[in-house]
Structure formats: C-alpha cells, structure tokens
C-alpha cells in the first residue's frame, strides 16, 4: 500500500496544476493598466507590437502570476483547512514545488523586465518586492488592510501603467502626467481591494487578518472604500480640465457619477452588495482609466 501511495504522488507538478496556481483570471487588471500605459505614452502602437506583446506577458502571466503563486505558497496551511482541493494543499503541486515556481517566475519576470529597459526593470523590481512582501513573512502585508490593499493597488495599477508607458518609449521615464495618473488610479484601487474583504469577515477575524471591515466595521469600511475610489477620480477630472482636455474630463465625470449611483445602493447593504458593486463599479472605474490614458496621449501628440 505504501509503495502504491508513493507511486501515485507526483514528483513534479502537471501543467494544468501550474496554470491553476497562476490564477489567469487575476491577470486582467495589470494587463488593462499596462494597456493604459501603452496608450498614454503617445508612441505608435502598431510599430511596436512585439514590444507590446512582451509587456503584456510581463504584466499578466509573469508579474501577476508570480504574486499569485507566492500567495498560494505562503497560504498553503490555511488553504489546507479552507480549500484543500487547491493545487498546493491537494498535492497536485507536490513538495516544495510551490516555492520553486515562485522563484522561477520571479527570475523570468525580472529577466524580461531587464530586457525591456531600465525604467521597466526598476518598476518590476518594486512590484516584485511588493508581491513577496504582501504574502511572505516577516512583512506579510495582507494581514493588514491598510498596507496590503495599497501594495496590490500600486502593483496591479500604478506600476503596470508606468511599465506600459516606459516600454513604448524605449525604457525611459514616462512624462509626469502619466506618473500622476498612475498614482491616482493606484490609490483608487485601494478602495476596490477593500470591496473584496466583505465576503470573509468572520474567517478573517478567526485568522487574525486585519482587513478594513474587521478594523473599522462594515459601514465605516464601506464608506471609506467609496471615498478612496471616488476622490482620486475627482482629482483626475480637475487635472484633465487643467490640461485643456474638457471632453475627456466630462467623460470621466460621467464615469464617476455612474459609480456614485452604484455606491449609494452599495452603502445600503455593504455585505450583501459588495460583490455586486465590485463587478459593476470596477468595470466602470477601469473605463475611466482608459479615457484618461487617451487624454494624456492627446497631450503627447
């Protein structure tokens, strides 16, 4: 029996298990932010399709994929209780292969980032440091909603946006307008991340995960999430007017008004409607990101 059990245990992970632990569904936000950076750069896109493809590979499957496998590795003991069928606790990714994959994806990400230029490499170093600090001790930023949500917002939105712009201009530093937009939308993403924390408040209390709903209570955390999402967009609107882009400013204003309408309904019952608001509100939010990117592109033109 022991011999058959040993033979049934894989020595190396199968490709489907590796793909599952990389969580492809999570790649969209950084890939979208990267696309915003590409658009905002003002550089001709069709002339650099290979570079754009390399950047998308970096932002999604590599950088974001790394953050996912690192998170799954350091959450393996909790997942063994709550979600034992996931690749690492189930043994489909056996032994220390979760850690090995984390190192392999980290190395591959940084090698590609280095090839794409100094500013891309610098942004990727920061993003990779945040990815590890989010999940791994001693920092484990995910244990506190203030820091963990900020780390994700900066990595998935701001750094991906800056990387997209830097890739298109030969790895140089993007214009300050691009950096400001990337920062503002990163801050707004902090509120988006808070929306994800309403679905597991009881479990987070038991596991001593200090999300904002745990720290502030449901109602105050919901109000804060709405303010943190909305205020940076209001600043973006003011900036677009100051940059003589009134049409883009009005369009982002409409986007924000739609979100405000959704926020009012969300605040009526945050726990029941957090997933609903996340699905609709975030879709509208990222639309404003792309509108802002086209505004900056027009400035560059």
Image (cartoon, rainbow, N blue to C red):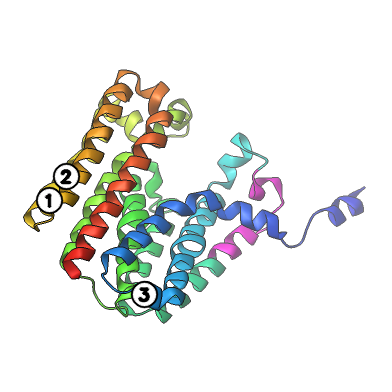
Residue 268 on image: x %, y %: 31, 18
The residues colored magenta run 86-102
* In the image: residue 195, left or right of residue 238: right
Whether label 2 touches label 3, CB < 8 Å: no
Neighbour tally class for label 2: few under 14, some 14-19, many 20 plus, Cα within 10 Å = some
Q: How far apart are labels 1 and 3 at the CA level?
A: 35 Å
Whether label 2 touches label 1, CB < 8 Å: yes
Residue in view at x 24 percent, y 28 percent: 223
Find numbered disc 3 in the image and state the secondary structure of the residue it sits on. Answer: helix
Residue placed under numbered mark 3 in the picture: 121
Residue in view at x 59 percent, y 41 percent: 79
- Magenta stretch contains residue 101: yes
Residue 165 on image: x %, y %: 30, 69
Residue in view at x 21 percent, y 52 percent: 184
- Identify the disc placed on residue 250: 2
Choose top left, top right, bottom left or bottom right for residue 179. bottom left
Neighbour tally class for label 1: few under 14, some 14-19, many 20 plus, Cα within 10 Å = some
Residue 82 on image: x %, y %: 59, 34
Asked if residue 94 shows in the view, the reply is no
Asked if residue 255 shows in the view, the reply is yes
Residue in view at x 41 percent, y 50 percent: 140
Q: Nearer the viewer, mark 1 or mark 3?
A: 1
Between 126 and 245, the residue placed more toward the observer is 245
Q: Nearer the viewer, mark 2 or mark 3?
A: 2
Between 48 and 194, the residue placed more toward the observer is 48
Residue placed under numbered mark 1 in the picture: 246
| Picture mark count | 3
- Magenta stretch contains residue 70: no
Find numbered disc 2 in the image and state the secondary structure of the residue it sits on. Answer: helix
**Looking at the image, is mark 2 or mark 3 earlier in the sequence?**
3
């Amino acid at each position: 029996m022991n011999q058959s059990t040993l033979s049934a245990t894989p020595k190396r992970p199968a490709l489907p298990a590796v793909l599952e632990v990389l969580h492809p569904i999570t790649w969209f936000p950084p890939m979208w932010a990267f696309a915003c950076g590409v658009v905002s750069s003002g550089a001709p896109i069709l002339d650099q399709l290979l570079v754009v493809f390399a950047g998308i590979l970096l932002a999604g499957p590599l950088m974001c994929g790394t953050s996912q496998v690192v998170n799954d590795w350091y959450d393996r003991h909790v997942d063994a209780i709550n979600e034992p069928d996931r690749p690492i606790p189930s043994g489909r990714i056996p032994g220390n292969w979760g850690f090995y994959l984390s190192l392999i994806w980290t190395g591959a990400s940084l090698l590609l980032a280095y090839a794409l230029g100094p500013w891309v490499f610098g942004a990727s170093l920061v993003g990779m440091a945040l990815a590890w600090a989010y999940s791994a001790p001693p920092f484990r930023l995910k244990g506190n909603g203030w820091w963990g949500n900020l780390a994700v917002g900066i990595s998935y939105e701001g750094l991906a946006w800056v990387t997209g712009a830097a890739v298109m201009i030969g790895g140089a530093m993007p214009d300050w307008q691009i950096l400001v937009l990337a920062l503002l939308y990163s801050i707004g993403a902090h509120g988006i991340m808070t929306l994800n924390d309403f679905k597991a408040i009881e479990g987070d209390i038991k596991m001593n995960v200090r999300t904002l709903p745990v720290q502030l209570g449901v109602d105050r955390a919901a109000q804060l999430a709405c303010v943190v999402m909305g205020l940076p967009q209001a600043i973006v609107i003011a900036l677009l007017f100051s940059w003589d882009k009134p049409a883009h400013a009005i369009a982002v204003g409409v986007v924000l008004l739609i979100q405000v309408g959704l926020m009012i309904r969300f605040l009526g019952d945050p726990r029941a409607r957090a997933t609903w608001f996340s699905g609709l509100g975030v879709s509208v939010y990222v639309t404003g990101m792309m509108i802002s990117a086209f505004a900056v592109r027009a400035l560059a033109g």
